[in-house]
Amino acid sequence: MARRPTERLMKTRREKIEAMLVDEPQDIFLRYTLSLELHGEGQTNRALSLLLDLTRESPPLCPCLFPYAQILAENDQIEESRGFLRDGIETARQQGDLHAASEMSEMLADLGQM
């Protein structure tokens, strides 16, 4: 069955973000938002890859540290998540982002073994 013309014109949030990234491929906010959209669509590996890239920026983007660790934990990569959280807490403290450090500390405690 053929789609109606209006259905073809409608884009998902992910498609809109991807279109904006064509013009601004280094836009950190767009890249972060795309990673969350991908995760929501079940594209875990792509989401993790984008988040990891953002944590490797100079300086690392603190808002990406927590969701990266969360996605790892959701996918039963607990040890990897713990290690990433430990590093992320230190990074957040160095950047003065006490909220991010606290959030990651709580998650690390929830995962057990600090």
Image (cartoon, rainbow, N blue to C red):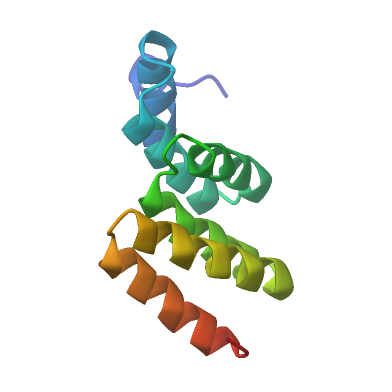
Residue in the picture at 33% in, 19% down: 6
Number of numbered markers: 0
Give residue 23's quadrant in the image: top left
Residue 112 picture location, percent across and down = 60, 90
Quarter of the picture containing the N terminus is top right
Residue 86 picture location, percent across and down = 56, 70
Instruction: Using the image, determine if residue 50 lies above or below residue 101.
Output: above
Residue 38 picture location, percent across and down = 52, 43
In the image, 33 versus 96, the foreground residue is: 96
Identify the residue at the far front of this view.
Answer: 94
Evaluate whether residue 1 shows in this view. yes
Instruction: Using the image, determine if residue 16 lies above or below residue 29.
Output: above
In the image, 82 versus 44, the foreground residue is: 82
Residue in the picture at 46% in, 64% down: 90
Instruction: Using the image, determine if residue 78 lies above or below residue 94.
Output: below
In the image, 26 versus 22, the foreground residue is: 26
Give residue 21's quadrant in the image: top left
Residue 69 in the figure: left or right of residue 98: right
Residue in the picture at 53% in, 19% down: 2
Residue in the picture at 40% in, 44% down: 61
Instruction: Using the image, determine if residue 21 lies above or below residue 88.
Output: above
Residue 52 picture location, percent across and down = 58, 44
Quarter of the picture containing the C terminus is bottom right
Evaluate whether residue 76 shows in this view. no
